[in-house]
Each structure stands twice: as structure tokens, then as C-alpha cells.
Image (cartoon, grey):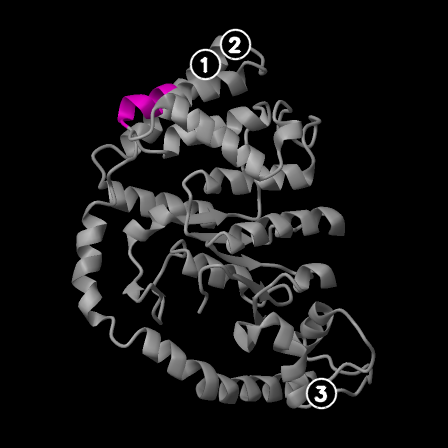
Amino acid sequence: MVQPGEILAILGPSGSGKTTLLTALGGRLGGKLSGTITYNGKLFSNSMKKSIGFVTQEDILYAHLTVTETLVFTSLLRLPNSFTKQEKIEHAKSVLSLLGLTKCKDSIIGKPMLRGVSGGERKRVSIGQEMLINPSLLFLDEPTSGLDSTTAQKIVSNLWELAIGGRTVVMTIHQPSSRIYHMFHTVLLLSEGIPLYYGKGSEAMEYFSGVGYEPAIAMNPSDFLLDLANGVYSDQSNEDHALNKQKLVSAHKNCFDAKWKPIILDENPDNNDDESQSRIEDSGFGKWSTTWWQQFTVLLKRDLKERKHEPFSALRICKVIVIALITGLLWYRSNISQLQDQVISIFSS
């Protein structure tokens, strides 16, 4: 349970299920899932995806576009026609300023063999693309991955400011520094898909001390939590890691049943009445924010800007046209809502 104005950090070692959980919460995980996800007491529906931002771990950006061009093209595509073209451009520039990207606004994004903006700036551009729609809920999959501690702190500081402004931020993170850890309002610790702790980040060490696990020396709380998630408590070679995990799982279940379960049940007394409303909301999910012609012209202009740096040849042009025609025929006369769901599941995989 996450409230507006909070950052929920999902911690855990590699393979603990952080990304899987985040993808499921964002409605991007295919297949049949058990359990219930509610937003403001209502069951999750496809229409809610319009107010949810999702930043993947990999930054999918066009290398030859500048930071400003990237955000402006996204703004022209995603913002509704209630905004004029100039208002969309101004909105993109305001998001650029909000994320501290003014100094590199005219720099290209770049790629491994092409020098561009830094890793931290590239990550902020990815966040900015989702901020353009002003989401009330923002999901981020390891936004600090591959960054140094100072740059990672700047990213999390930006997210903290967004959360304080009234948004809800949920993020996975592998091994944050102590400075970053203390920015988290709520922490969820996972181990092999099983929660070991859920609560305020500032109370985590006190909780584990209460169940018999206390660090021998002063250390970064996140390091200690990750050790426990791996079943490691002491440096003894004969330590039973499985037994440590079992004790922590049992302690969390008792704490959750006593402290959090009644609160969650009070927040969501009955969701059955919302099922018909969710169907009504989903009926309008296929409506795009812009017209087909607007999307075509914006995408064509963006593609030409990106491809003008590539070698020109008739064969390359024919290849692009043929692939576009084949792709169009595959989705011709398809249900819009099903098409979007399938595209989302493809990208998440």
C-alpha cells in the first residue's frame, strides 16, 4: 500500500522478483495472475494505464535526436488535442527544466559508438517522457542501475521532489547507498518472491532488531537488508541460510497479519461492485489522444531526423517500406485494446 507523496522502494537480491512484481503492478505482465490490485479502492483497469508512467530499466531512445527533440516529439504524440502544438512544446520544455536537463538540451542522446549525454541525463530523459502525461503514479525499474553514487543520488532526489509534489513513486533498486536509502518513505524487502519486510524505511533496522537480527557493526541499512534477504546474518561458514530466511518469513507474516492486513481490508472492503465500472472505463481505452494523421506526421518527421545520419540507398528505403506494410497488415482491423495489450507484453518481455 502506497500513498500519494510517498516513495516505495522494492529491495532484494537479483532474482528476488522485484521487476516481476513491478511489471504486474503496472499492468504489463502477461498471463493469468492471482490476487487483487486496486487504485483508490477500485480494481485495476486498462483505462488507468493512461495515468500511470512506467520507466523501464533499459533506456529506449533515438541516438541522433537531441534531448529537446526527444521530449517534444513525445509531447506531440502523447498529449491530447486539448493542447495546442505550441502548448505541447512549452510543456516539454517545462519538464526538461524540472528535471535539470537545461544544460544538455541541445545535446544528442548518443549510443555506445556515438558520444552523447551521460548515463544519468539519459535516465532523466526517460523519466521526462513519462512525466509529460503528468502521471499520478510512476513506476521505475532500477533507475540507478549502472550509475555512480552521486549521479544515482541526483536521480532519486528528482524522484523525491516529484513525490513530495503529490505523486506516488514505486521503484525497484538493487543496492542503494545510505544517503539514497534514507529518502525512501516505505521499503519492501523481497527474497525469492517472498516479502521479508514492509514498512517505513526508517523503522526497518528497529524491526529486524526486534526479531533477533541486529548488525554487529554500524553499516548501510540496505546492505544489511540484502544480507538478510540472502539468508546471511553472520560470517560463520556453518550458518544455516535457509533457516534464517524461514524465521524472517514467519516473523513478517505475523507482523503483516497484525499490523497491515486490517488496514488494507479497511481501505478495500469490497471490490466486486467495481467490476462493471471497470468494463465501462475499458470501453474507452482504445481512443487515442491524437488523430491518425497527427501520429503519422510526427512519427515520419522523427524517423527522418533519425535516419538522415544513415547511408542513403534505394534498398534501405524499400526494406523500410516493405516492413512497414507487413506490420500494418498484421494489425489491420485488429481490436485496438487487444493490440495495445499485446504490444505492452512484447516490450515488457
Does residue 197 appear to the left or right of 103 in the view shown? left
Note whether 189 is above or below 304 in the view shown.
below
SS type, badge 1: helix
- Alpha-carbon neighbours of circle 3 within 10 Å: few (<14), some, or many (≥20)? few
Cβ–Cβ under 8 Å for marks 2 and 3: no
| For residue 4, above or below residue 196 | above
Please tell me which residue is depicted at 62% across the width and 22% down the height of the picture: 106
> Pointer 2 and pointer 1: residues touching (CB < 8 Å)?
yes
Q: Residues within 10 Å of mark 1 (few under 14, many from 20)?
A: few
Q: CA distance from mark 1 to mark 3?
A: 62 Å
- What residue is disc 2 on? 313
Residue 292 magenta:
yes
Q: Which residues fall within the magenta stretch?
A: 291-297
Which residue matches tag 1? 317
Which residue lies under the disc numbered 3? Answer: 240
Task: Please state which amino acid type lies under the numbered disc 2.
Answer: Ser
Helix, strand or loop at label 3? It is loop
Q: Position of residue 267 (x, y in %)?
A: 34, 74
Locate residue 248: give its quadrant. Answer: bottom right
- Please state which of residues 213 and 21 is positioned toward the viewer in this rendering: 213
How packed mark 2 is, by other alpha carbons closer than 10 Å (few <14, some 14-19, many 20 or more), is few
Q: Earlier in the sequence, mark 1 or mark 3?
A: 3
Sequence-first disc among 2 and 3:
3
| Percent x, y of residue 141 | 55, 53
- In the image, farthest residue toward the front: 165
Query: Which callout, 2 or 3, points to the residue nearer the camera?
Result: 3
> Residue 282, relative to residue 21: is it above or below?
above
Amino acid type of the residue tagged 3 in the rendering: Asp
User: What residue lies at 28% left-to-right and 64% top-to-bottom?
Assistant: 42
Q: Quadrant of the N terminus?
A: bottom left
Frontmost of labels 1 and 3 is 3
